Image (cartoon, coloured by chain):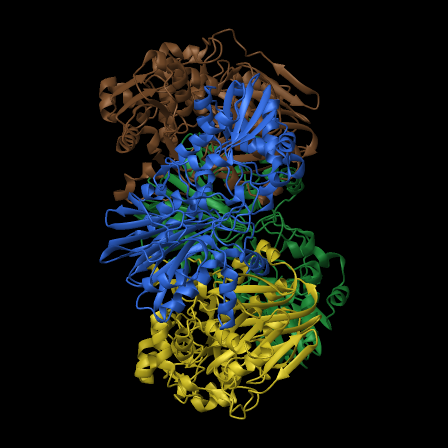
Chain colours: A brown, B green, C yellow, D blue
Amino acid sequence: MSETFTGLHEECGVFGIYSNVQEDVAAICYYGLFALQHRGQESCGIVVNDRGVMTGYKDNGLINDVFTQRVLADLGLGNIAVGHVRYCTSGSNTRANAQPLIINHIKGSMALGYNGNLVNAAGLREELELSGSIFHTTSDTEVIAYELTKERLTASSIEDAISAAMKRLRGAYSVVMMSPKKLIGFRDPLGFRPLVIGASDNGYVLASETCALDAAGAKYLRDLAPGEIVVIDENGLRSITDNCVDSPRALCVFEYIYFSRPDSVIEGSAVHTARMRAGSMLALQHPVHADVVIGVPDSGLDAAMGYAAQSGIPYGLGFIKNKYIGRTFIQPEQQQRENLVRIKLNVVTDTVRDKRVILIDDSIVRGTTGARIVRLLREAGAKEVHMRVSAPPFLHPCFFGTDVSNRDYLIASHRTVQEMAELMNVDSLGYLDVHSLDMIPDNYHAGLCKACFTGQYPLDISEAPDKMRLEERLTKKI
Amino acid sequence: MSETFTGLHEECGVFGIYSNVQEDVAAICYYGLFALQHRGQESCGIVVNDRGVMTGYKDNGLINDVFTQRVLADLGLGNIAVGHVRYCTSGSNTRANAQPLIINHIKGSMALGYNGNLVNAAGLREELELSGSIFHTTSDTEVIAYELTKERLTASSIEDAISAAMKRLRGAYSVVMMSPKKLIGFRDPLGFRPLVIGASDNGYVLASETCALDAAGAKYLRDLAPGEIVVIDENGLRSITDNCVDSPRALCVFEYIYFSRPDSVIEGSAVHTARMRAGSMLALQHPVHADVVIGVPDSGLDAAMGYAAQSGIPYGLGFIKNKYIGRTFIQPEQQQRENLVRIKLNVVTDTVRDKRVILIDDSIVRGTTGARIVRLLREAGAKEVHMRVSAPPFLHPCFFGTDVSNRDYLIASHRTVQEMAELMNVDSLGYLDVHSLDMIPDNYHAGLCKACFTGQYPLDISEAPDKMRLEERLTKKI
Amino acid sequence: MSETFTGLHEECGVFGIYSNVQEDVAAICYYGLFALQHRGQESCGIVVNDRGVMTGYKDNGLINDVFTQRVLADLGLGNIAVGHVRYCTSGSNTRANAQPLIINHIKGSMALGYNGNLVNAAGLREELELSGSIFHTTSDTEVIAYELTKERLTASSIEDAISAAMKRLRGAYSVVMMSPKKLIGFRDPLGFRPLVIGASDNGYVLASETCALDAAGAKYLRDLAPGEIVVIDENGLRSITDNCVDSPRALCVFEYIYFSRPDSVIEGSAVHTARMRAGSMLALQHPVHADVVIGVPDSGLDAAMGYAAQSGIPYGLGFIKNKYIGRTFIQPEQQQRENLVRIKLNVVTDTVRDKRVILIDDSIVRGTTGARIVRLLREAGAKEVHMRVSAPPFLHPCFFGTDVSNRDYLIASHRTVQEMAELMNVDSLGYLDVHSLDMIPDNYHAGLCKACFTGQYPLDISEAPDKMRLEERLTKKI
Amino acid sequence: MSETFTGLHEECGVFGIYSNVQEDVAAICYYGLFALQHRGQESCGIVVNDRGVMTGYKDNGLINDVFTQRVLADLGLGNIAVGHVRYCTSGSNTRANAQPLIINHIKGSMALGYNGNLVNAAGLREELELSGSIFHTTSDTEVIAYELTKERLTASSIEDAISAAMKRLRGAYSVVMMSPKKLIGFRDPLGFRPLVIGASDNGYVLASETCALDAAGAKYLRDLAPGEIVVIDENGLRSITDNCVDSPRALCVFEYIYFSRPDSVIEGSAVHTARMRAGSMLALQHPVHADVVIGVPDSGLDAAMGYAAQSGIPYGLGFIKNKYIGRTFIQPEQQQRENLVRIKLNVVTDTVRDKRVILIDDSIVRGTTGARIVRLLREAGAKEVHMRVSAPPFLHPCFFGTDVSNRDYLIASHRTVQEMAELMNVDSLGYLDVHSLDMIPDNYHAGLCKACFTGQYPLDISEAPDKMRLEERLTKKI
């Protein structure tokens, strides 16, 4: 998975801040989102709340392209803000889907940023449309906004409306939102996607990952519990746990393996350490005589360090990744495309020449990229290349906010390990055993969603096909 | 009114095309909107319909800034398109209000572009919000979209839904919209804003003004009747006249005086000729001995030609306007601001030196700009400056889609003509008599809205204050 | 000549300011150049001198595209500045040729902006190259800089060096330059190109045209005499007239007919008035029975007013030119190109329908554009179209800084007037008689260069072919 | 040295290609420069030679900002190209100094890209100025171009002219240039800066580092010898060794320690391996009891791996560097600047909490940045922090093309090691011993320039002060 994801479903990052004083909350949001950029490179947005007046800006692009000094200044001061980064998809005109979503309703305004995927969005949307609702976007966020608004008509507060609406939303969702006077975060009852709370100098911060707390200068307090609603306003922070259920959790294991930043800590377990541990277990499960262990940058480096430490085989620097690669890099002509891997990634020849090399990555996406990387190693003189993958093979689609349902990721589902090894031209190939996944986090963690590997979904997914048909219908660029 | 309008309410331009073949309808829309650019410089948008799939792009900026070659190419081919230009207001973050609006509802997609102002938007919006509706924008367009969608739930066709919804919409509206298979235009029963139909090589074109038909290579067929709905689809063009009423029309007289382009023809009457005629009548009503008649570019030039022809006093070129002035022009520092008029507008000294000058403009907005222009003339050696205004003084706010309600325009409402003359430092000042307005178009036209001059509104405006309060509430930049 | 010029040779605009105080001279330069934008749209530049330190910025593009608020701020304060606008040619990579040119030499720095063309540039350049000189640009400006530098090695001051170098420069040149402490302007002994001096609040201003003095808030003092050097420093303004000769002047008549802005005054004669007078004489020389006189915007409007006044036939508004046309306008596809004239220029039908029309322009460039304009008039119902051109036909190339040598302009040189009339499809065609040209300025002006009409060059042009070969050799984009 | 250099002197990267066929040499140049981007981020340029016609483009900015698809396409095809990347300095208006430099002279055109610094540039420049030369830039490149041009007047070929001119150039220079028909590289007789030759499919490639050969799809042939001139034309490659002398070489040791990319190989020795070895020796010279070895990304990682391997103490991932940091990142307000290090660099807490940490970097620039990094580690729970630097302290200025003369780098020159340790708040501090430097490359390499550590310069630097005064004089932004 050395390349970025591409596809329809999105993995996203959310951020929110509540301050007791009027200050440059947009700038703090900017730094928080900047730390979450790896969770979404397609579009980004910030909405600032200045005494109930919400001013927002969002566009396609990276945080530091979209938010210039002037755009940030135009957002002005405020005491609440929410921000969002969204996944990179192919369409250039999908600006309408950028978040946070700002809407007006009978009780005022709200702004929402969302990470996840609703299994029953199609049904909810149809029901809304049948009562005359109109939709500007194709995203679940608008469905959630409608559900909250409907409940808000009769509920005595926005948090009561959220609590009621959550009973109707099925799937993965971590939402950060604000009403005129409150910053609110809530997380689905199974806790698919992470969401954490931090304490800042003047109030509180909500974020998808702890690395964003660090960047925003906030101290980690705790993860939101699955099903929890957290409300922050002038009276401080309070928690609503009506929707917290006793069933097993379903935290996406891929947050540990790939999505989150290595310096983040999810539910008490450090991501870098979890990846090291995946590497260690891989060394135990698939040992091989070799001279050096290298990782594919950046996704395979942590596990490679774990494999090396466990096996006693030296860890080496196998590749240099060109750090100036960006969105705007010009693709070479067809005849030079072969060369593109080398432009992004160059072998450190001394590390691998005349050596038996163990190559670690966290997954195999398209065989072609992997095969090119292996070829680079052989051209540089590697005697043997043993590939080790720090996750099991993807066999089943994901319906909870990742792109794993994309066919590219399911390449392994109709091939034997031996066939994959031949495709990549490696001397041996080993995947992490699926039963090891629960041991990756610090404490044995039985509440992980591993459905993409096992096909055992933590939630009834019988409505998912409707959602997919809806997405197909709505994938008109609007 | 030598400067562009600024303010909250918008005057806009709409364009639509239906073609029997798959072609570059986006490009034709681009040329049409380019000819309508004077009706709105804030934002613009084009939506292309390719067999039901609607692809749109809209942004703040002028047509040829927003629509680059690449953006146009990305819109692709299609057989229907609608476009919109919107007025220049101060906010830079109001991109959400750009049109056309694209929405999905239970029966499919639609895209709407709108020119006008609803008097009862506040009431309609509140009613919608009370049933759980959410709003992404602050514009009337979204209210109209909701009303159409609601009616569409029970109507047998989109045109039936429009016909039913029009009974609830009160105010000025000229709308161009498309459903997956139809291009539709409709106009309010009083006909405040213009809307014309043209025949193109492969179908039909709808536009706010005939100059856009010319630019799009289409031949003028006729104006839509007030209250008329025109539907264009694979069966050709048909008209629905359910909402056409027998009451007097109320075409905005300011379309002749200022808004429309001089080369456009509205309801059979050429705009340039109407302005010439206003100048002629001004000469009859306010004669003065003088040596030359000049106009303030560009808005006063037509009337100046009419005044000169009627009075026999030679028409002269009084000013050169710098034609490179654009949005991005850097404002001078405070101490040089005095100089700004001269940077935009320079006197042709030979024309006015030692002369008695009649200076024509179509209105007086801020006295300050006018006073500066008069000062330029005196510095260039004009012996006398007699100002003539080719419209009556604004005395009452407009509620039908113009900015005349802005206080700047009502400067005359609490000043005598003599006080205004002193403010401008002119030797004499004369306004066009309000009774002459009906004679400006080719044929005596009793159906003009002159409310901004007379206070006699063609429609019950008792709901207007609600609308203004709503706008105040919503003028949060979202 | 309703279209902009295109070609290799450039017509340019120069501006300079000397202030007794440290101030925002860059901003004043900006406003001055903005008024001279019509003299060159390819590139522009400003150099500010802050106590001898010269900071410059130049780029391809229009003044208000290149000079953003930030770029202007970066230039900082100073007490001298020079600026330049350069003609629009096709190449996009000729940024190296943008001016002012800044160079260092043994005695310090200098910055030069230049308008004109040297006949003997090729010879001077070869001589310099033979002594080891290297050239970064293909422009004459660098040759002039070298000649000044060489003389400066032995001269006691920069003005002495200029005086000596001028004896070697043959051709048209109006130069504005600065040394660390002086603002200097000089003009070739025949005075081909204009250059004027104005007094500003804190010092002096030099500019190609008086309209730039107006924009910069300066009062016109006088034109530089042909051959004069004007030096402005802390001691005020002084004049050096060593190179002023007694021979007849050779002011380019096209400055009156086309290049300069109508509100400028050249050598005491107002440009608008000169053009009116050309129109008057045209009426006397080529009368015709007609109903209306119209001009092609913007170049034909002044002469049309003159023709109308002289003939007694009413002046009418024949066309509306879309004022939003800019550099970035997207060209239509081949099949729509026919339509492009109409997008830029639309007929005011009422003015010409069923009328005998006299159409005035200042020249005929490509017959094709003219023919399209005539077709527009006929489609709008004009009964007859009589074309009158307010200049004689171009028959000979220009070697003094205009583009008239371009073949497009010499279309008339191998056609009879009758053939031209047929090409344009007009009912009659008349050019201004060449002998009338001396009467266009206010006082009979025998010192005009009319070589493009007569072939009688005011200067030995035997070296010009070398220059043209040089340009061909150097037209490698560098 | 975790931050990028800033300062006047430049370190640069050069690239050149000669192809036997007409092809997209600009694209190959683009990929080559992209791999050399770390050698210069201020500006970049490419010049393409199409049968003697040289077309170039250069601007401030990174390769993939400056060279868009369109700019590359405009450069067109050719068979020779040269490219350049230049160091990041503060000025935004120094575009004039971007390279390659393209000039015309009596024998044709040439384009040069240069890496190095001439000690005697001031004297050469003065001599040239005294003969009337003018300078457009402040860079040595223009001096070299003049010297070549002068010799070319009498030499029989460009390579003879280079050979003669080299006898006058004193200092560090690796130049890649082209004449109308030849690609030429030459290197100063002491070989301060690297320059390598590669074989491509259709010809040859010259580059500062081997990583650029890899990116361009070329195979490494050899390094140019110090003093060698390599000429590539239709007859193939030939070498001129007139200026190769027998004295000891003086390859900049900092190319191994910091400048070059870890995957490059210089004079047979791999950079990553050299850095590992520096880390190993550091472990031997400054051992300490500790639990983990971490490096400051990216500059300290290689040496940290070497220290860990030698000491047996585990190598850990101490920091995550935000990979989206770019030029345009918005600096936080003063009160948040403290936080900036954390935004760029976040600690992986698990790696350091309750541990004794050895922290490796390749140099100490400003103590402040180092102190902040140490504070991050202590806040994350590190029990002890022992800093080890994989180079000796800088004590003397560099005159050969690096920024080490900058005062920031000489912070250690007036402090004891103990004082430095206190400044950084580390428990212990150790620098690499200066005598170890010769052992860093693969084979003991006596020909390294270590002057910045030892003060023993390989070249007479008595003229250097003149150069520094010249630079001060010319540091006017032009």
| Residue B316 seen from this side | no
Q: Residue A41: image x %, image y %?
A: 45, 34
Q: Quadrant of the N terminus of chain B?
A: bottom right
Question: In the displayed structure, would residue C414 be above or below residue A156?
Answer: below
Q: Which of C363 and D71 lies nearest the eye of the viewer?
A: D71
Quadrant of the image occupied by residue A112: top right
Q: Residue C231: image x %, image y %?
A: 63, 78
Q: Residue C130: image x %, image y %?
A: 39, 75
Q: Residue A432: image x %, image y %?
A: 35, 15
Q: Quadrant of the C terminus of chain B?
A: top right
Residue C310 placement, left or right of C75: left
Q: Which of C260 and A364 lies nearest the eye of the viewer?
A: A364
Residue at 45% of width from left, 13% of height from top? A250
Quadrant of the image occupied by residue B422: bottom right
| Outermost residue, bottom side | C246
| Outermost residue, front side | D246
